[in-house]
Image (spheres, rainbow, N blue to C red):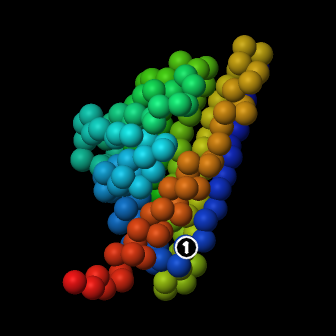
Amino acid sequence: MAMRRNKVHEFEADVPAAELWGLYGTLRAAELLPELLPQVLTKIQLVSGDGDVGTILELTFAPGIPGLETYREKFIKVDNENYIKEAQTIDGDILKLGFLYYMVRFEIIAKGPSSSVIRSTIVYEINEETHPGLEAMVSTGPLAATAEKFAGYLKEQKIPQSS
């Protein structure tokens, strides 16, 4: 029987929510990820769209992750008021492994004028009878690393560079 489940990670960042959304809510995230996390993703290519709902990206994993080379995701929600973005896997190795549904949701929640929470959620569905080991593959680790790297990147941008 297939059941929809989710795994959530929260990261507190001392960066304003609007600044974080400036990365998460735009295609800038796709440009930065391979640069900041080359051990997870080596390439993210814009297939179609402008960063809004309907945008399709192709993501290429770093070598060494068994069974995972590439997959495509489509932005199914981009809420610029509430800082929520959802990207659903529409093609590629994640689905070939046996996931019936795989979606990542990012929510940027303001905690104060200069702090926020990055809530990353993976919503997924698997048939446990045919793919009993798949549950163990679902990890918020890369999303946690992304949150940390993005927050660090934004903080570094604020430090005046000495010439």
Q: What SS does tag 1 mark?
A: strand
Q: Is residue 150 something one can see in this rendering? A: yes
Q: Taking the image as drawn, is residue 95 in sight?
A: no
The image shows residue 72 at horizontal and vertical percentages of: 40, 31
Where's the C terminus, which quadrant? bottom left
19 sits to left or right of 103: left
Between 60 and 18, which is closer to the camera in this rendering? Answer: 60
> Residue at (68%, 46%) from the top-left corner?
7
The residue shown at (49%, 83%) is 114
Q: Quadrant of residue 134?
A: top right
Q: Position of residue 117 (x, y in %)?
A: 58, 69
Is 79 positioned to the left or the right of 121 in the image?
left
**Could you tell whether 153 is left or right of 109 in the image?**
left
Residue 1 left/right relative to 59: right
In the rendered image of this protein, does residue 11 appear above or below residue 47? below
Task: Report the residue marked by disc 1.
Answer: 13
Q: Eyeballing the image, is 23 above or below 12?
A: above
